[in-house]
Image (cartoon, helix red, strand yellow):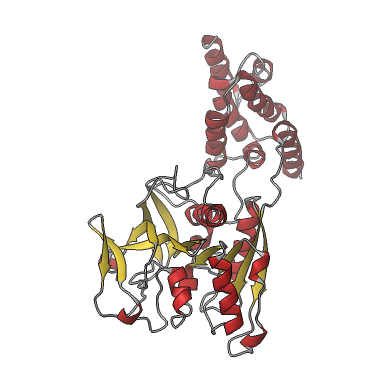
């Protein structure tokens, strides 16, 4: 119960110091779903949550009839939206809906093709031009070439063969190919992606298409031995399309959907599709090449959460919240006033009777280098605590030498 009170206390404190205005949603998005050989009932609510999490989008979900149902009743009004996310792989849309979708894109509507959405509509010429590359659905050389990277060169391969394959799900490395594109700008050149289907042998028209990032399909795991496209952009008419082959959904989400690399590129790709630019900041928990970074609750780490979890920290837990706090201080604190805001929030944890000794040790470590005379009284009060004595004395000595 004490930990719950501490959590509420620290959240309220943090909001006092760091409350910022939320953006009103600038864009409306429609997620089209209802049929898929993948778990669309799991993925579509997550995609809606991720879009709305940016503060840029409000999102609706349009659910088609079940497979074999009357598709003449499925007529979403695309014109009401700025973005359409295709989380669909099933029966053909009726001609009216097809024409409305193409008209939407031609007039500048943004599109995100998500994972198995690129399996859809092999017979629909305009959709395949919008999608760029696709797989399965009896796609062959008649539908366009394979496109992939080999030895850092993009290959257009007209070899005869089926379109679409993947090995067993596994973690893999994603590599940026156009690092200066707004979607990828500022992200690592390489990062580790959560266990996913590494789509390979995609083929299609590939017109007006750029490959932003690839992943190597290792032959030891049954892959092609090629660097396969994972993130792409396509231009069609006046519309911009972001195509991500990442993000396989399991019950409750799963590592591919929960991967911060997928989440962030999906969010940034959606913004680029509607505006041609990306204003979103790169989160501190974006993965690097060493390890996958997951968000099991699909929420970005926040300062409020950092402070709350640090206050209840014990040594057996991950230090990722402390690491996030450190990153925020280093990148967000530009003036003495900025540092003081962080310092005041951390002092409250030191003074809290409910905060754990392990949590206070982390705070003492951080205050030892960035604290000021403001921290000294709270630190001195901890010298009498046998568990914190050494850490408190170290922090005081370090603060004294930094004057």
Q: Position of residue 383 (x, y in %)?
A: 63, 19
Please tell me whether residue 27 is drawn above or below residue 2 in the rendered image: below
Please tell me whether residue 123 is drawn above or below residue 266 in the rendered image: below
Q: Residue at x 52, y 48 (%)?
A: 277
| Foreground pick, 8 / 268 | 268
Q: Residue at x 48, y 78 (%)?
A: 120
> Can residue 159 be seen in the rendering of this structure?
yes
Q: Residue at x 48, y 74 (%)?
A: 127
| Quarter that holds the N terminus | top right
- Snapshot quadrant of residue 95: bottom right
Q: Position of residue 391 (x, y in %)?
A: 56, 23
> Can residue 390 be seen in the rendering of this structure?
no
Q: Position of residue 70 (x, y in %)?
A: 64, 89
Residue 296 is left or right of residue 168, and the answer is: right
Q: Residue at x 62, y 30 (%)?
A: 360
| Foreground pick, 358 / 384 | 358
């Amino acid at each position: 119960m004490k930990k719950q009170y501490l959590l509420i206390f620290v959240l309220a404190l943090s909001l006092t110091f760091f409350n910022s205005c939320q953006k009103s949603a600038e864009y409306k998005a429609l997620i089209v779903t209802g049929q898929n050989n993948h778990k669309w009932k799991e993925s579509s609510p997550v995609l809606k949550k991720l879009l709305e999490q940016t503060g840029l989008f409000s999102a609706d979900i349009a659910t088609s009839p079940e497979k074999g149902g009357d598709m003449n009743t499925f007529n979403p009004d695309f014109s009401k939206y700025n973005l359409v996310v295709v989380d669909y792989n099933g029966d053909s849309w009726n001609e009216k809906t097809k024409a409305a979708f193409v008209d939407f894109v031609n007039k500048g509507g943004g599109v995100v093709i998500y994972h198995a959405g690129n399996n859809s509509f092999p017979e629909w010429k305009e959709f395949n031009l919008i999608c760029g590359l696709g797989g399965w659905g009896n796609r062959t050389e008649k539908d366009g070439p394979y496109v992939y990277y080999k030895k850092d060169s993009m290959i257009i391969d007209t070899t005869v063969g089926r379109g679409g394959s993947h090995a067993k799900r596994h973690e893999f490395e994603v590599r940026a190919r156009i690092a200066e594109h707004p979607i990828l700008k500022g992200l690592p050149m390489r990062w580790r992606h959560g266990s996913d289907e590494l789509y390979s042998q995609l083929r299609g028209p590939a017109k007006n298409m750029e490959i932003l990032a690839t992943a190597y399909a290792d032959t030891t795991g049954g892959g092609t031995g090629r660097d396969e496209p994972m993130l792409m952009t396509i231009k069609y008419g006046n519309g911009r399309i972001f195509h991500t082959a990442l993000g396989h959904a399991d019950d409750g989400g799963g590592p591919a959907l929960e991967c911060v690399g997928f989440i962030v590129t999906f969010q940034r790709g959606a913004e680029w599709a509607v505006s041609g630019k990306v204003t979103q900041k790169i989160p501190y928990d974006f993965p690097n090449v060493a390890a996958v970074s997951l968000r099991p609750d699909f929420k970005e780490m926040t300062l409020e959460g950092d402070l709350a979890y640090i206050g209840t920290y014990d040594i057996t837990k991950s230090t990722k919240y402390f690491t996030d706090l450190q990153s925020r201080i280093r990148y967000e604190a530009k003036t003495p006033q900025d540092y003081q805001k962080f310092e005041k929030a951390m002092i409250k944890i030191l003074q809290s009777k409910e905060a754990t000794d392990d949590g206070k040790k982390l705070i003492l470590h951080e205050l030892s280098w960035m604290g000021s005379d403001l921290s000294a009284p709270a630190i001195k009060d901890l010298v009498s605590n046998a568990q914190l004595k050494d850490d408190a004395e170290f922090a005081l000595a370090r603060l004294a030498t930094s004057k």
